[in-house]
Image (cartoon, grey):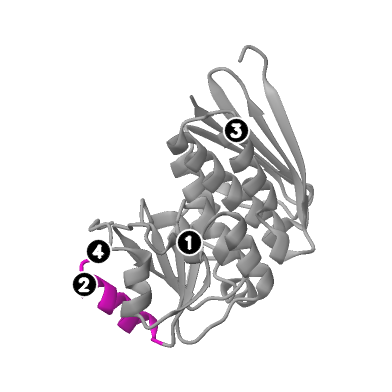
Amino acid sequence: MSESLTFHFDVDGEDFTSAGQASVQVKKNLRRLGIPPEIIRQVSIAMYEGEINMVIHAGGGEADVIVSEDKIEIILADKGPGIADVNLAMQEGFSTATDSVRSLGFGAGMGLPNMKRYTDEMTIDSVVGEGTTIKMVVNL
Amino acid sequence: MTIGTIKELLEAEVLCGEDCLDADVHSACGSDMMSDVLAYVKDQAVLLTGLVNSQVIRTAEMMDMVCLVFVRGKKPTQEMIDLAADSGMAILATDMRLYEACGKLYVNGLVGNGRKL
């Protein structure tokens, strides 16, 4: 695979039920490309956490997954409220999720730390009032 | 332990994946918090939960699980069952509480992953 391959998804922010569809699709696509299972798992968990975050906090957004020869990049961009204190948001257990989100089984404050844990690189670019772009890299 | 044995031990109903009952599983986890499942679970093949929404199925799928057990008499919607069937997962439903269901499986040899934080 000498050229990179990009998968693009619009993540619907209105519907919690459909959240995660993009991640499921990415998982299938990566399987078809013959990517090793452990890498697929890392990518799909990190992306799923990010996708859930976009739906819970930002009213949806866009997701791009770029597969190249030596790495898989996941770029999640939203026009949500932004993250005021990224360091705080990265702390395990810190969450701004509402009780209704918790009742759905999310909002334990593990999303961002988990995304970092499952990827080799992660950068968060966030401006309050404008949105957040998260870029994650898993090396192949 | 096979998924069929889990069905027997938990006196569970099979909602999908009848054809997976002979499949062998080696460890399990129990939680109503999907965030924690995504954060702490590693290589467990079975998830026991009392939470019912489509994200339970997606979480299990992301974690490569092969069997989901709904406890406390919770029943998933047809949409959730279809989603699980699509990804080749078995779904069981039992009237037992989470603690009791996990305990029954554990004493019969289905362990967790033995890790501490």
Q: Which residues are magenta?
A: B96-110
Q: Nearer the viewer, residue A71 or B3?
A: B3
The answer to whether the residue labelled 4 contacts the one labelled 1, judged by CB atoms less than 8 Å apart, is: no
- Please name which of the two marks, 2 or 4, marks the residue nearer to the observer: 2
Q: Nearer the viewer, residue A97 or A126?
A: A97
Q: Are tags 1 and 3 found on a single chain?
A: no
Label 4 lies in what chain? B
User: Which amino acid does the dot numbered 2 rest on?
Assistant: Asn
User: Which amino acid does the dot numbered 4 rest on?
Assistant: Val
Q: Is residue B106 magenta?
A: yes
Q: Which comes sooner in the sequence, label 4 or label 1?
A: 1
User: Which amino acid does the dot numbered 1 rest on?
Assistant: Asp
Name the residue that disc number 3 marks: A32
Label 3 lies in what chain? A
The answer to whether the residue labelled 4 contacts the one labelled 3, judged by CB atoms less than 8 Å apart, is: no
Which SS class for mark 4? loop
Q: Nearer the viewer, residue B114 or B27?
A: B27
- Please name which of the two marks, 2 or 1, marks the residue nearer to the observer: 1
Name the residue that disc number 2 marks: B108
Label 1 lies in what chain? B
Q: Is residue A139 magenta?
A: no
The answer to whether the residue labelled 2 contacts the one labelled 4, judged by CB atoms less than 8 Å apart, is: no
Q: Are tags 4 and 3 found on a single chain?
A: no
Q: CA distance from mark 2 to mark 3?
A: 37 Å
Q: CA distance from mark 4 to mark 1?
A: 23 Å
